[in-house]
Image (cartoon, coloured by chain):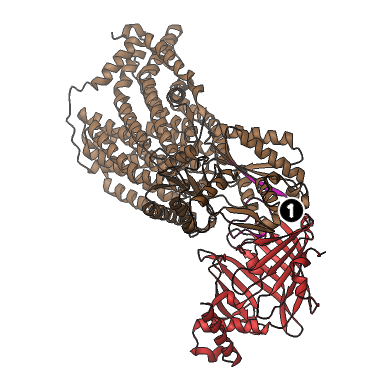
Chain colours: A brown, B red
Amino acid sequence: MRDFLLRSVVYRPISTLLICLTIIIAVSWGAGLLVFKGDSRVFFKPDNPQLQAFDQMESVYAKSDNVAFLLVPKNRDIFTRENIELIHSLTDRSWQIPYVSRVDSLTNFQHSFASDDELIVGDLVRNPQLIDQPMLDQLRAISLREPLLVKRLISEQGHVSLINVTVQKQGVDPEQELADISQYARKLQQEFSQTYPDVDIHLTGLVMMDVAFIEAALYDNETLVPLMFIVVFLAIGLLLKTITGSIAALIIAISSIAVTLGATGWLGIYLTPPSAAAPIMILTIVVADCVHILSGMIHEMRQGKTRHQALYDSVSTNLKPIFLTSATTALGFLTMNFSDVPPFQDLGNMVAFGVMIAFVLSITLFPALLSLLPMKVSSQQNYQGSPLMTKMSHFVVAHHRRLLPGSVIVMACMLLFIPQNELNDKYVEFFDESVPFRAATELMEQELSGIDTLEFSIETGVTGGINNPQVIAAIADFSDWLRTLPEVDHVNTITDIFKRLNKNMHNDDPSWYKLPDNEELAAQYLLLYEMSLPMGLDLNNQVNLDKSATRLVVTLKNLSTYQLLELEEYVSDWFAEQYPDLELKSSSISLMFAHVSKKNIESMLFGSVIALILISPILGVALRSAKYGLISLLPNLLPAGIAFGIWGLLVGEVGLGLSVIIGTTLGIVVDDTVHFISKYLHARRERQMSPQDAVHYSFQRVGPALWITTFILIGGFLILGLSTYRVNAEMGIMTATTIAVALIIDFIFLPSLLIATDKAAVAAQPDEDIENNQLTPKEKLPC
Amino acid sequence: MLVSKVSAILVALLIVSFGIYGSEASSLTAEELGLSIAVKAKQLDRGWGDSQADMTMILRNQNGQESRRVMRTSNLEVQDGGDKSLVIFDEPRDVQGTAFLNHSHPVGPDDQWLYLPALRRVRRISSQNASGPFMGSEFSYEDMASFEVEKYTYKYLRDETLNGHDCTVSEYYPVDRYSGYTRQIVWLDKTMHQPIQIEFYDRRNSLLKTLTVKDYQQYENKYWRPAYMEMTNHTNGKSTVLLIENYRFGTGMTEQDFSQAALTRIR
């Protein structure tokens, strides 16, 4: 059956080609159904507790999706007529941004003051055209004294200002809504930058972050994927010296990607920024299969076989190892299903699927293509094998006594650096410095305040509870305490409004800038104030329906996830201890990312262990030996550990993307080990070679394919490292590092280990695996 | 500007009084027709003098959580000027006795005062902001204030049957630049000359809220008043139901009961 199939493929290529192409086109058709989802919500499962808490808080108060204009005047002073005019006019125009529900700026801040028996509530700046110097001075004095403004909408020095636009996406077509909002905001940014060339206008906020996610993924697929194709094409062409082979491999790669995307589309799974990396990963891994078949075929042809015979032999001998390596790679990627981040699950499943499709295509379509396309290889009668591999194997065999302990020491040293890695995800740093969102956000942090927030809902459980003087006092104390924390930039609290109103109601007497001391008074102040606020600037984002709860928004300096989680716990504990009668709920986008990042690392470690447990027996069975299955564990596991050691030494920050590395690289790394050990065992078992000779044999037979595939894999994942989306970039760099380390281990440590253990075994008693082995190692020692 | 507006209303009044209305009005522009419908509605609702009613507001958020506000309202019709209204809050209890007085003006911002019992003082509220939420509800004061012809310009759109009511559908464009809306689409019942449904369009001219008005009853053989109003906000998923009961007419209230001084005497 197997033989019939292989013969049909090699000797009846046209029908194979037609059947394959029909299926490929049919499945790929589904790619048209693919939907791309880019907003930050895709990172969370629907039942994610932090997402639910966040949704809960948003439905009680108001949504916090926003676009923020950061205004940095070149004269470093906001309080000039022109700059105030800019803020006033941009505020006005921002009400036209699609889905806007609220615009907060310096000029529309609802300033309240007393005049005789009148309470006046209104925009802080009404007619900027009429403003003169005394008014500017007064404006500066009021703004820089107002706790609701300073470090939120205006810097302490008054040199930068923010316009915060809150939007309520309807979620009907999230991508289109994001695009509508961001395009309008960018249009305003551009227009105002032209009208006011002396002010730099930057865009940030959660909407712009979501847009940055989408744009990074688009950039990757527009630039990195084509680049990757070129690299693969050149690498195969130059290393294996065959253009037709390159073309055939590319066709397999494109087909595998197309089928995977098609199937994804048919299944109705949507693409996300992380899963958009699937094509590059599939491309990279697919090529490895092709290289094995191609290099096997070339090897046979050099030894004088005909093209078709060489092709048949190559496919026939490579069938099992390719299946095995594809299966382990797929298994490794399937561990991503343990991730708490749905896009990583999709990425894992897509790559796993793609790899299995690639396996099928590389033993069907690929040989059919090779059989049809012309290929010339100069046959070398005295082919001595790769000179590089010869040198390499002689070096290792000669020095294995020193190489084994030496490499153990080096590896142990590397592993020591693993603890240097610190859990750290700043979602601003999901993007590299070239992305405007990151630049704007970092500038904002430097000049005004961070983008991370913690939102606290303080719940009394009693209708009108937030008007209770004791509760107000508690909230005020809590806010004051929060302001003393070094991580905190700004606290938006209702108690500042209470104080201001109390002062206003006592003819602006500064000594009355304090909390109202009875419940009715507080309630009536709020009623009065609410009656005076314009549409879109109400208190519904701070107070719930029955006034039993209020929301505090704490703006933080840009923190790492680790610091954020610690801070949240510290604050919650402090609150619980101080105010046991009040309930504190916390939530925010930042907090959601922090939790998911932490949880993802935990679950992915578990997933990696499962992968190991699944892959190890497969290796044992494939190698027909428990002993070699166990030995193979070391070169399979060490690369990821060492790569993390190197990462700890050079970078030291581990984020969302890196938590999936162990599982995914395991599958790829295993390939090299399987190829090397299986050839080694073949030599020992069938050809009764000594351990040393078996090592030479392995180097000759699989060495070139290993280093070429490794080279291509490293190239491919390094290209992914160019992504502006750092989650994907780090995943690429880390995978490349792991694979590179794996090759070094397979070429130096693994052969040394094999020789050492087998020699020991032979010395003690004949190895069960190597019966009839008459030769002692010493007799066959070549040098 | 004002003169031309007043004369437009006079023209509309003439049109209405000569009974040129409905199908015979094809010679009128959509704007003139819209204005005449509004004028007719206002005209038919004249003469009620003064009235009182009890109101309950039920606020709901997306989670179905509810909160209640209870208040009493009094209204005084003022000929040749804006009507006056007084709202006294009964619930939530911590604002009990708070009273809100409004003197509306056909042109220019209304005069508003609030009496805070906890402070035992009347405060005039100077605010062009009638567009914010009333008591945290989905109604703004603008939505609840008495209808004055001069507050809008009009455009008749079409006739339509809605929920069994034969209606005219017109667009109202607020004159006040501080209004929260660019326009409203009003479904006016042809026999009652009262709204059945109003759609509110925000500053971006996209649909923000829909008001549904139900359970009309005729009082004094003339004046139609609803018992049920529901405002649904389409962007935040919140809604507010306003239940109005116990309408009373001819209660004998006078201008004096709607003065600042009267506020402090309220129970």
Q: Can residue A364 be seen in this view?
A: no
Label 1: chain letter: A
Q: In which quarter of the image is residue A375?
A: top left
Circle 1: element type: helix
- Compared with A560, A533 (above or below) is below
- Give the left or right position of residue A112, taking residue A521 as reference: left
Callout 1: few (<14), some (14-19), or many (20+) C-alpha neighbours within 10 Å? many
Kind of residue at disc 1: Ala
Find disc 1 in the rendering and name its residue.
Answer: A523
Q: What stretch is highlighted in magenta?
A: A531-554
- Compared with A149, A400 (above or below) is above
Q: Is residue A529 visible?
A: yes
The residue closer to the viewer here, A590 or A554, is: A554
Instruction: Tell me residue A331's x, y (percent).
Output: 47, 35
Q: Is the magenta stretch mostly helix, strand or loop?
A: loop
The residue closer to the viewer here, A649 or A744, is: A649
Q: Does the magenta stretch include residue A713?
A: no
- Give the left or right position of residue A39, taking residue B186 as reference: left
